[in-house]
Protein backbone atom coordinates (compact mmCIF):
# COMPACT_ATOMS: atom_id res chain seq x y z
CA UNK A 1 0.00 0.00 0.00
CA UNK A 2 1.50 3.34 -1.08
CA UNK A 3 1.69 6.17 1.47
CA UNK A 4 -0.45 9.24 0.71
CA UNK A 5 2.68 11.15 -0.28
CA UNK A 6 3.69 8.37 -2.69
CA UNK A 7 0.17 8.35 -4.16
CA UNK A 8 0.50 12.10 -4.85
CA UNK A 9 3.91 11.51 -6.47
CA UNK A 10 2.49 8.70 -8.59
CA UNK A 11 -0.43 10.85 -9.74
CA UNK A 12 1.79 13.74 -10.89
CA UNK A 13 4.23 11.36 -12.55
CA UNK A 14 1.41 9.85 -14.63
CA UNK A 15 0.00 13.28 -15.43
CA UNK A 16 3.41 14.44 -16.71
CA UNK A 17 3.89 11.32 -18.85
CA UNK A 18 0.48 12.06 -20.43
CA UNK A 19 2.15 15.12 -22.01
CA UNK A 20 4.74 13.00 -23.85
CA UNK A 21 4.24 12.44 -27.59
CA UNK A 22 5.91 10.06 -30.07
CA UNK A 23 9.33 11.21 -31.30
CA UNK A 24 10.09 13.50 -28.36
CA UNK A 25 13.54 14.02 -26.88
CA UNK A 26 12.95 14.07 -23.12
CA UNK A 27 14.88 15.38 -20.14
CA UNK A 28 14.52 12.76 -17.39
CA UNK A 29 14.90 14.20 -13.89
CA UNK A 30 16.17 12.61 -10.68
CA UNK A 31 14.70 11.77 -7.29
CA UNK A 32 11.77 9.58 -6.25
CA UNK A 33 9.02 11.47 -8.15
CA UNK A 34 11.07 11.57 -11.35
CA UNK A 35 11.82 7.85 -10.89
CA UNK A 36 8.06 7.12 -10.87
CA UNK A 37 7.76 9.16 -14.07
CA UNK A 38 10.63 7.19 -15.69
CA UNK A 39 8.96 3.91 -14.66
CA UNK A 40 5.65 4.99 -16.21
CA UNK A 41 7.47 6.10 -19.39
CA UNK A 42 9.29 2.76 -19.59
CA UNK A 43 6.00 0.87 -19.20
CA UNK A 44 4.36 2.86 -22.01
CA UNK A 45 7.36 2.38 -24.33
CA UNK A 46 7.26 -1.37 -23.62
CA UNK A 47 3.54 -1.48 -24.50
CA UNK A 48 4.33 0.55 -27.67
CA UNK A 49 1.97 3.30 -26.50
CA UNK A 50 4.93 5.69 -26.97
CA UNK A 51 7.43 5.30 -29.83
CA UNK A 52 10.73 6.86 -31.01
CA UNK A 53 11.45 8.38 -27.60
CA UNK A 54 14.95 9.48 -26.64
CA UNK A 55 15.80 10.28 -23.03
CA UNK A 56 18.54 12.50 -21.61
CA UNK A 57 19.11 11.58 -17.96
CA UNK A 58 20.24 13.96 -15.21
CA UNK A 59 22.00 11.50 -12.90
CA UNK A 60 23.70 8.14 -12.85
CA UNK A 61 20.77 6.72 -10.84
CA UNK A 62 18.37 7.89 -13.57
CA UNK A 63 20.60 6.42 -16.26
CA UNK A 64 20.62 3.02 -14.53
CA UNK A 65 16.82 3.02 -14.12
CA UNK A 66 16.12 4.14 -17.70
CA UNK A 67 18.60 1.60 -19.10
CA UNK A 68 16.99 -1.22 -17.12
CA UNK A 69 13.59 -0.19 -18.50
CA UNK A 70 14.87 -0.16 -22.09
CA UNK A 71 14.42 3.60 -22.63
CA UNK A 72 16.78 4.74 -25.45
CA UNK A 73 19.22 7.33 -24.10
CA UNK A 74 21.56 9.96 -25.50
CA UNK A 75 23.93 12.33 -23.78
CA UNK A 76 23.17 16.04 -23.56
CA UNK A 77 25.97 16.72 -26.04
CA UNK A 78 24.45 14.32 -28.58
CA UNK A 79 21.02 15.99 -28.87
CA UNK A 80 20.14 19.15 -30.78
CA UNK A 81 17.34 20.07 -28.37
CA UNK A 82 15.08 18.73 -25.61
CA UNK A 83 11.34 18.89 -26.25
CA UNK A 84 10.17 18.32 -22.70
CA UNK A 85 12.02 17.94 -19.39
CA UNK A 86 10.21 16.50 -16.35
CA UNK A 87 11.74 16.68 -12.88
CA UNK A 88 10.90 16.87 -9.20
CA UNK A 89 11.81 19.66 -6.77
CA UNK A 90 12.51 20.13 -3.08
CA UNK A 91 10.77 23.50 -2.72
CA UNK A 92 8.50 25.49 -5.06
CA UNK A 93 7.64 29.11 -4.25
CA UNK A 94 4.55 31.03 -5.44
CA UNK A 95 6.56 32.43 -8.40
CA UNK A 96 7.57 28.89 -9.50
CA UNK A 97 11.18 29.41 -8.40
CA UNK A 98 12.70 26.23 -7.04
CA UNK A 99 15.22 24.68 -4.75
CA UNK A 100 16.53 21.41 -6.18
CA UNK A 101 19.47 19.16 -5.46
CA UNK A 102 18.22 17.10 -2.54
CA UNK A 103 19.71 14.18 -4.44
CA UNK A 104 22.86 16.18 -5.35
CA UNK A 105 21.93 16.07 -9.05
CA UNK A 106 21.20 19.77 -9.59
CA UNK A 107 24.14 20.48 -11.95
CA UNK A 108 22.89 18.15 -14.66
CA UNK A 109 19.25 18.88 -13.81
CA UNK A 110 19.74 22.60 -14.41
CA UNK A 111 21.58 21.99 -17.70
CA UNK A 112 18.72 19.83 -18.95
CA UNK A 113 15.99 22.19 -17.70
CA UNK A 114 17.72 25.16 -19.34
CA UNK A 115 17.92 23.28 -22.65
CA UNK A 116 14.27 22.16 -22.65
CA UNK A 117 11.56 23.83 -24.72
CA UNK A 118 9.18 22.98 -21.86
CA UNK A 119 10.17 22.25 -18.25
CA UNK A 120 7.49 20.57 -16.15
CA UNK A 121 7.99 20.14 -12.40
CA UNK A 122 6.26 17.29 -10.59
CA UNK A 123 5.75 17.63 -6.83
CA UNK A 124 3.44 16.63 -4.03
CA UNK A 125 1.81 19.45 -2.10
CA UNK A 126 4.36 19.22 0.76
CA UNK A 127 6.91 20.93 -1.54
CA UNK A 128 4.96 24.21 -1.83
CA UNK A 129 6.41 27.03 0.29
CA UNK A 130 5.84 30.77 0.67
CA UNK A 131 9.56 31.53 0.72
CA UNK A 132 12.56 29.43 -0.32
CA UNK A 133 15.19 28.08 2.12
CA UNK A 134 13.26 28.63 5.34
CA UNK A 135 13.37 24.89 5.93
CA UNK A 136 14.99 23.01 3.03
CA UNK A 137 18.76 23.54 2.79
CA UNK A 138 20.07 24.98 -0.50
CA UNK A 139 22.63 22.63 -2.10
CA UNK A 140 25.80 24.13 -3.58
CA UNK A 141 28.14 21.87 -5.59
CA UNK A 142 31.81 22.73 -5.03
CA UNK A 143 35.20 21.56 -6.25
CA UNK A 144 36.69 19.21 -3.61
CA UNK A 145 39.83 21.35 -3.32
CA UNK A 146 37.81 24.47 -2.57
CA UNK A 147 35.06 23.34 -0.19
CA UNK A 148 36.45 24.99 2.93
CA UNK A 149 37.20 28.28 1.21
CA UNK A 150 33.70 28.37 -0.34
CA UNK A 151 32.18 27.48 3.07
CA UNK A 152 33.89 30.51 4.62
CA UNK A 153 32.67 32.81 1.87
CA UNK A 154 29.10 31.56 2.22
CA UNK A 155 29.30 32.08 6.00
CA UNK A 156 30.46 35.67 5.35
CA UNK A 157 27.23 36.07 3.32
CA UNK A 158 25.27 35.06 6.46
CA UNK A 159 24.58 31.40 5.69
CA UNK A 160 24.85 28.39 7.98
CA UNK A 161 26.88 25.86 5.98
CA UNK A 162 27.35 22.09 6.30
CA UNK A 163 29.36 19.74 4.12
CA UNK A 164 26.92 16.99 3.05
CA UNK A 165 28.00 13.68 4.54
CA UNK A 166 27.08 10.13 3.57
CA UNK A 167 24.96 8.11 6.00
CA UNK A 168 26.69 7.24 9.27
CA UNK A 169 29.24 9.99 8.42
CA UNK A 170 31.14 7.57 6.17
CA UNK A 171 32.76 10.53 4.39
CA UNK A 172 31.36 13.31 2.23
CA UNK A 173 28.77 12.69 -0.49
CA UNK A 174 30.46 12.80 -3.90
CA UNK A 175 28.39 13.97 -6.89
CA UNK A 176 28.24 12.31 -10.32
CA UNK A 177 30.77 14.95 -11.40
CA UNK A 178 33.18 13.99 -8.58
CA UNK A 179 32.51 17.11 -6.49
CA UNK A 180 31.22 17.82 -2.97
CA UNK A 181 27.99 19.46 -1.77
CA UNK A 182 27.60 22.24 0.79
CA UNK A 183 24.06 22.54 2.19
CA UNK A 184 23.30 26.09 3.24
CA UNK A 185 20.58 27.87 5.18
CA UNK A 186 19.78 31.57 5.34
CA UNK A 187 17.71 31.70 8.51
CA UNK A 188 15.33 34.34 7.08
CA UNK A 189 14.99 32.45 3.80
CA UNK A 190 15.87 33.73 0.33
CA UNK A 191 13.95 36.85 -0.73
CA UNK A 192 15.60 37.40 -4.12
CA UNK A 193 16.39 33.99 -5.67
CA UNK A 194 17.73 35.51 -8.89
CA UNK A 195 20.42 37.63 -7.27
CA UNK A 196 21.24 34.89 -4.73
CA UNK A 197 21.70 32.34 -7.52
CA UNK A 198 24.30 34.49 -9.27
CA UNK A 199 26.02 35.69 -6.06
CA UNK A 200 26.64 32.09 -5.01
CA UNK A 201 27.73 30.98 -8.47
CA UNK A 202 30.23 33.87 -8.59
CA UNK A 203 32.24 32.39 -5.69
CA UNK A 204 35.36 30.72 -7.15
CA UNK A 205 35.12 26.95 -6.68
CA UNK A 206 31.31 26.82 -6.95
CA UNK A 207 30.03 24.68 -9.83
CA UNK A 208 26.32 25.36 -9.44
CA UNK A 209 23.68 25.89 -6.79
CA UNK A 210 20.19 24.44 -6.48
CA UNK A 211 18.22 27.65 -7.11
CA UNK A 212 16.25 27.23 -10.35
CA UNK A 213 15.10 30.71 -11.34
CA UNK A 214 12.72 31.48 -14.22
CA UNK A 215 13.14 28.03 -15.75
CA UNK A 216 9.79 26.43 -14.98
CA UNK A 217 6.92 26.35 -17.49
CA UNK A 218 4.46 24.27 -15.49
CA UNK A 219 4.17 22.81 -11.98
CA UNK A 220 2.02 19.72 -11.50
CA UNK A 221 1.04 19.38 -7.83
CA UNK A 222 -0.34 16.21 -6.31
CA UNK A 223 -2.90 16.95 -3.58
CA UNK A 224 -5.09 15.03 -1.16
CA UNK A 225 -8.66 16.20 -0.62
CA UNK A 226 -11.11 14.05 1.37
CA UNK A 227 -8.73 11.10 0.99
CA UNK A 228 -8.81 11.52 -2.82
CA UNK A 229 -5.57 12.15 -4.72
CA UNK A 230 -5.77 14.76 -7.47
CA UNK A 231 -3.38 16.81 -9.66
C1 LIG B 1 17.55 15.71 -6.98
C2 LIG B 1 16.37 16.62 -7.01
C3 LIG B 1 15.02 16.00 -6.83
O1 LIG B 1 14.24 16.32 -7.92
C4 LIG B 1 14.41 16.53 -5.57
O2 LIG B 1 15.30 16.21 -4.49
C5 LIG B 1 13.03 15.95 -5.30
O3 LIG B 1 13.12 14.60 -5.02
P1 LIG B 1 11.85 13.73 -4.62
O4 LIG B 1 10.97 13.65 -5.81
O5 LIG B 1 12.45 12.40 -4.22
O6 LIG B 1 11.19 14.41 -3.45
O7 LIG B 1 16.47 17.81 -7.15
O8 LIG B 1 18.75 16.44 -7.08
Image: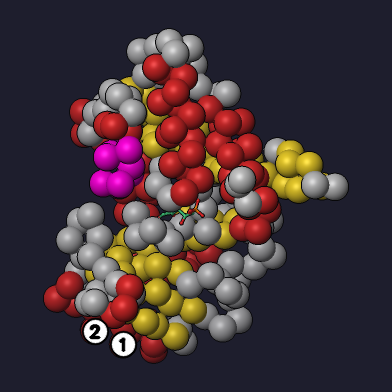
Quick one: which residue is furthest to the front in this view? 1
Does mark 2 have its CB less than 8 Å from ligand 1?
A: no
Residue 67 shows in the view: yes
Which SS class for mark 2? helix
Residue at the right extreme of this rendering: 226
How was the colour assigned to the protein in this rendering?
secondary structure
C-beta proximity under 8 Å, tags 2 and 1:
yes
The structure residue drawn at horizontal position 51% and vertical position 45%, both measured from the top left corner, is: 33
Along the line of sight, the residue nearer the viewer: 110 or 19: 19
Which residue shows up at 47% across the image and 49% down it? 32
Image height of 128 relative to 21, above or below: below
Q: Position of residue 20 (x, y in %)?
A: 50, 22
Position in image of residue 111 (x %, y %) = 34, 45
Quick check: 18 above or below 29?
A: above
192 lies above or below 2: below
- The label number, if any, that marks residue 148 in the structure image: 2
Which residue was labeled with disc 1?
152
Compared to 108, does 194 lie above or below?
below
Distance between the alpha carbons at the discs numbered 2 and 1: 6 Å
Left or right of 9 in this view: 166: left
Q: Residue at x 32, y 33 (%)?
A: 66
- Quarter holding the C terminus is top right
Viewer can see residue 87: no
Image coordinates for residue 167, horizontal then vertical, percent: 33, 73
Residue 133's disc number: none
Q: Residues within 10 Å of mark 1 (few under 14, many from 20)?
A: some
Q: Which residues are magenta?
A: 56-65
Amino acid sequence: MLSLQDQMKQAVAISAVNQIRDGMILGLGSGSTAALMIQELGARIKKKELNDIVGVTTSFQGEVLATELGIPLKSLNAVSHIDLAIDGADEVDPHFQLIKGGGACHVQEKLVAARAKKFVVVVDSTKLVDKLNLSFLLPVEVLPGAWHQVKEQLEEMGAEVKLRMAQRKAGPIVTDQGNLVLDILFKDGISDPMSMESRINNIPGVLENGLFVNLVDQVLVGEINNNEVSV
